[in-house]
Amino acid sequence: MGSLSSGSNDYGRRARVASKEIARAGSELKNEALYAIADNLLNNKEVIKEQNLRDIQGVESFGLSESERDRIVLTDSRIDSMAQGVRQIATLPDPVGELFDMDTRPNGMVIGKRRVPLGVICSIFENRPNVTIDISALSLKAGNACILRGGKEAINSNRILTRLIQEAISRTGLSKDVVQFVDGTDRSLVDELLEMSDYIDLMVPRGGSEFINFVKNNARMPVLLGGIGVCHTYVDRIVDECKARNIVMNAKVKRPSVCNALDTLLVHSKSAPTFLPAIAKRLGEAGVEMRCDNRSLAVLGPCNDQIRLKEAQPEDFGKEFLDLIIAIKVVDSLEEAIGHIDEFGSGHSEAIVTEDYSAAMKFLDQVDAAAVFVNVSTYFHDGGQFGLGAEVGISTQKLHARGPLGLKEITSYKWIVFGDGQVRE
Amino acid sequence: MGSLSSGSNDYGRRARVASKEIARAGSELKNEALYAIADNLLNNKEVIKEQNLRDIQGVESFGLSESERDRIVLTDSRIDSMAQGVRQIATLPDPVGELFDMDTRPNGMVIGKRRVPLGVICSIFENRPNVTIDISALSLKAGNACILRGGKEAINSNRILTRLIQEAISRTGLSKDVVQFVDGTDRSLVDELLEMSDYIDLMVPRGGSEFINFVKNNARMPVLLGGIGVCHTYVDRIVDECKARNIVMNAKVKRPSVCNALDTLLVHSKSAPTFLPAIAKRLGEAGVEMRCDNRSLAVLGPCNDQIRLKEAQPEDFGKEFLDLIIAIKVVDSLEEAIGHIDEFGSGHSEAIVTEDYSAAMKFLDQVDAAAVFVNVSTYFHDGGQFGLGAEVGISTQKLHARGPLGLKEITSYKWIVFGDGQVRE
C-alpha cells in the first residue's frame, strides 16, 4: 500500500469527513450501529475464528511467549464477550450534548458548556484484537471517528473485525469511514500516522513502555499517555492481616499481565514478622517469584526453603513485571513508603492497607497517582470497575483525563452563550 | 546566564520541589500570599514605574508600534488594577481538594475524583507585563509552581514584578520558587524551556500565531494552544438591526487588538440592503477600514464616499486583523455562513445575530468553536466575563480545556478509592 494521505488511502481526510457525520448522529442511530456490530460479530464467529487461526499459526515466526500468544486467541466465548461489551456500551448514556456548568451571568447572558465529540481518535496498539472492538465502539458512541492500527501478529483478526464493524455501520446508513483500519504492517505507516496532526485530534498508543515512549516523542498531535503501571501496595503498621493477604494476592496473582497488577510490596517493619511469612507462603503456592530486599530476606529466609525467594537487585524496584514476579521491601514508616512510591511509582495505581485512619488519609492525600486505593486491590483500576462502562485505556498523565478513559474522557466541550443584545463595556 | 537546568540556574528542579510545597498549602496560606503580593505591588509603585520607564525608553530600538508600546506601559491605575486582580483571585473558591463524581460501587467501594494541582506550569509570553501577575496569581491559587519567561521589551518590568511577587511569597513562609522568572533575553533559553518535559507539566505560550506555532512544534511537553482568534459575526435574515449594530460595533471597535475581536462580518443578502449601509456608517465613523466582497461593495459603493472601503482580497477572509480592519461578505443562507466559518474560522469565538429561533439553535449546534454566541458580542469571550474570575489564556484546542482557562482548568484530578478489603473476581 502507498501513502496514508493521498489517493484512495486518504485515511485522514476521510476520517475528518466521517467525524462530522458521526458527531451529528443522534443516540438512537449510534446505538443502532452498536447493536448491529454486536450482531455481526455473533453471526460471523466462524469466519472470525478462521482468520484468527491464520494469525495463531503465523505467530511462531514472531517468537511470542505463550501468554502473548494467548492474548491473540479468539474463542467462541471471547467473541461472545466482545459482542456483549459492545451492547453494554450501547446501553450507556450518550455523553454528547450534555449541558453542564450552565449559569446566568449578572448581565442576563445564559452561559455554559455543551459536551461535543473530540473529532478523530487514532489508536496504535499491539496484539490484542479485542482492542479493535473496544475502541471502535467507545469512539463511535462518543461521536468520534477512529483510525486503528493493530500489531502485525493479529492483522488477519483485526482486518476481519473491522470489516464486520464497517458492514454493520454501513447498514445503519452511517459512513463506514467512522471506523477505519490501517491494513498494512509496514512500520513507516506508523510514522505517517504520527505526522497527521491536521486530521487526528488524539493519539492513543497501547503497548509496552518502549512503544509508548516512541509515540510520545514522535507524535505531532496530543497523545494520551498511560498503560504503564509500576504499582505498589503498602501494608501498614496497624493492619488486618487477613484483608492485607487477600488484597495483595488479588493484585498480584489474578491477572499479572495487566498494568494495574502489583509490582512492589512495601511492608512496615512492625507488620513484617507475621505478615511476610504468611503472604510469602501464599505467593509461593501461586508460583510467584519474590525479589526481596535484605530486611525482608532476613524475615523470610529462615522459614522457607521451597518458595522462590531471590535477593532483589536495585532495578527490581520501579519495574513493571507484567508477570508472576514481585519485589518486596521493608520500610519503617508511612513516610518512607510514600517516599519510595514518589521515587519509583509510575503514577498509575497505588494502594495502602491499614486500619489506621490518619495513615489512610495521609496516603490518599500525598500519593500522586491516577488512582489511590485504601484497603482494596489495585486490580480494580479499570473503567468497568469504576462505573464508566468500558475504557479506551488508562491515562497516567495529568492533562485532559487521568485514570480510565471512558466515554466522557474522549469528548470535549464548547461554551454556548445565549444573549439578548448585550454589549461589553 | 548559563543553562537553565544546571547549577544555580536549575529552574526545573526547583520548580518541581516548590510545586510539591504549594500543592499541599492550604487555602488560607495561599490567599495570604496573594494579598501580600497585592500589597507589595501597591507599596512599590514608584520602583515599578521606574523599571517600566527603562523598558519604555528602550522600546524604540525594537521598532514597536504605538499600540504595542502601549501594552507595555504601567501607570498608577494599571498597577492598581493588577493588584485588584490579585485580590479578586484570592476571593475565588480554591479548586484544589474539590471532590466530584463520588459514588458507591455495588461492591461497597466508595470512589470518586479529587481535584489536584497540575504541578509546574511554564508560560512564555510576549510584551504585556500584566501577564506576569495574572499567571503567577492563578497558578499559585491552583497550587501550581510556575516558570515565566516574558519578552525582551518588558524585561525590566517583569524582573521587578517577579521580585515583588517572590518577596511577598517568602514573607508568608512559602518558597519563592513557587514563581520563577527566567531572567534573560537569549532565545536559546526558550529552546531550553521547551525541552524540559521532566519538570514542566504544561506549557502556555502567549503571543502571535507564528510564535504559538513555534512552541507547538518544538515543545516536548503538553502545550495549551490558543489566543488566535479569527472571529466571525453572522447577521441573519430576520434580525433586530439595532441589536446587530451594537453587537458588531462592540465586537469590532471596543478593543480591536484582542483575540476575541470581530474579524469578518457575514451578512445575509436579505438584510444587507438596510443593515450594511447603517453599520458601514458607524464603522467608518469609528475609523474602521472595511474590506468588502463584491456583493457588499455593490450595496455600499453608491451610498458612501467618505468611509474607508476597499475591495477584499482572498487573504482577508480567515485573517486575524488585531486592528481597526474588518472583512465583510454577503451570504445567501445560514448554511453558507456556517460553511464559511467552518472553512475560515480558527475555532475561537463565533456569533450569530438573529431573531429566528431555529437559526440560532442550528448555529449553536453546528459551529465548532471554543465559544459560540447568540445575539451577543464575541468580546465577551473572557474568563472574567464568563464567571471564572480571571484567566491564564483562551484555549482553542479540544483536549483538556477549551475557552477561558480559569483556576479549574489549570488543575488535574486523581481517583480516590475507599475500600474495605474488597477483591476483584
Image: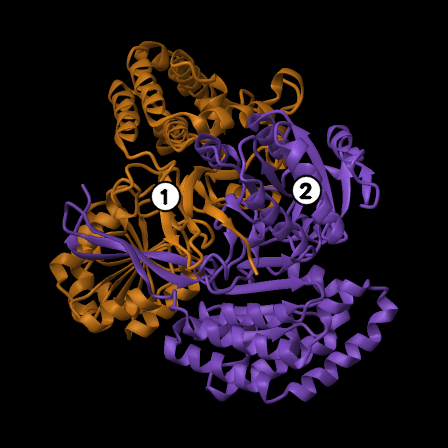
Chain colours: A purple, B orange
Mark 1–mark 2 CB contact (< 8 Å)? no
Image quadrant for the C terminus of chain B?
Answer: bottom right
* SS state under label 1: strand
Q: Position of residue B308 (x, y in %)?
A: 27, 52
The quarter holding residue A230 reads top right
**Real-space Cα separation, disc 1 to disc 2, in angstroms:** 37 Å
Q: Residue at x 48, y 50 (%)?
A: A401
Instruction: Provide residue A400's location: percent of width, then percent of height.
Output: 48, 49
Closer to us: B224 or A46: A46
- The one nearer the camera, B334 or B54, is B334
Q: Position of residue B288 (x, y in %)?
A: 27, 48
| SS label for mark 2 | helix
- Judge whether residue A273 can be spotted in this image: yes
In this figure, which residue is indicated by the disc labeled 2? A278
Chain letter of the residue carrying label 1 = B
Residue at figure coordinates x 59%, y 58% from the top left? A203
Query: Residue B263 location, x and y as percent?
Result: 34, 53
Q: Which mark is residue B229?
A: none
* Amino acid type, label 2: Ala
Is residue A222 visible from the viewing direction of this image?
Answer: no
In the picture of the structure, the residue carrying the numbered disc 1 is B99
Q: Nearer the viewer, residue A59 or B72?
A: A59
Which residue shows up at 56% across the image and 49% down it?
Answer: A377
User: Which residue corresponds to the image point at 45% horizontal and 42% vertical from the top-left?
Assistant: B412
Q: Nearer the viewer, residue B135 or A238?
A: A238
